Image: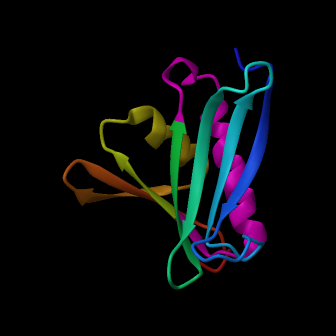
Amino acid sequence: MINHMHFTKRSFSRNRHPPDANSHEMAFIALDEITGQMLGLVRLKDELDEETAEFAILVRSRLKGHGLGWLLMQRVIDYAKDKGLRRVYGDVLAENASMLQMTEELGFHAEDIGSGIRRVVLNLKSDE
């Protein structure tokens, strides 16, 4: 179902200067190579401390459970490690069992933050 796919990387800058390796926001977008249709994306946004970043992920409903979310998360985790971030986190609905399972398998730990939301956190540095 996701045989013809490629990834593109986009960085975002809030000022007029072109984005670069020090951009505070990055997105990886999975595109269908034939139609150009977006299949999914994951975004990473640095916190003010520049050691932590929040991720958000979106995968087309028909592609959930086919490994696309896993591929996108691996890309953003690798990017965060290369950038030297200490941790990555995201907020997940407590009812989203498949996302919570995937993040656990990727090494995240989850904590309840109320209102039916679980915060998943991945420490990227071995000293944490």
Residue 34: where, in percent of width, then height? 79, 19
Extreme residue in the left direction:
115
Q: Nearer the viewer, residue 118 or 40?
A: 40
Q: How many marks?
A: 0
> In the figure, 89 relative to 2: above or below?
below
State which region is magenta.
Answer: 59-88
Q: Is residue 38 left or right of residue 94?
A: right
Extreme residue in the bottom direction:
49
Secondary structure mainly formed by the magenta segment: helix
Q: Quadrant of residue 37?
A: top right
> In the figure, 26 relative to 62: above or below?
below
Q: Residue at x 60, y 77 (%)?
A: 15
| Color scheme of the displayed model | rainbow
Extreme residue in the top direction:
1
Residue 26: where, in percent of width, then height? 65, 60
Q: Residue at x 49, y 62 (%)?
A: 89
> In the figure, 44 relative to 87: above or below?
above
Q: Residue at x 78, y 68 (%)?
A: 82
Asked if the stretch drawn in magenta spans residue 75, the answer is: yes
Residue 11: where, in percent of width, then height? 69, 62
Q: Is residue 60 left or right of residue 22?
A: left
Residue 121: where, in percent of width, then height? 49, 62
Q: Quadrant of residue 81?
A: bottom right
Residue 121 shows up from this direction: no
Residue 114 shows up from this direction: yes
Q: Residue at x 46, y 32 (%)?
A: 98
Asked if the stretch drawn in magenta spans residue 3, the answer is: no
Q: Quadrant of residue 124?
A: bottom right
Q: Is residue 76 left or right of residue 111?
A: right
> In the figure, 95 relative to 22: above or below?
above
**Which quadrant of the rendered structure holds the N terminus?**
top right
**Which quadrant of the rendered structure holds the C terminus?**
bottom right
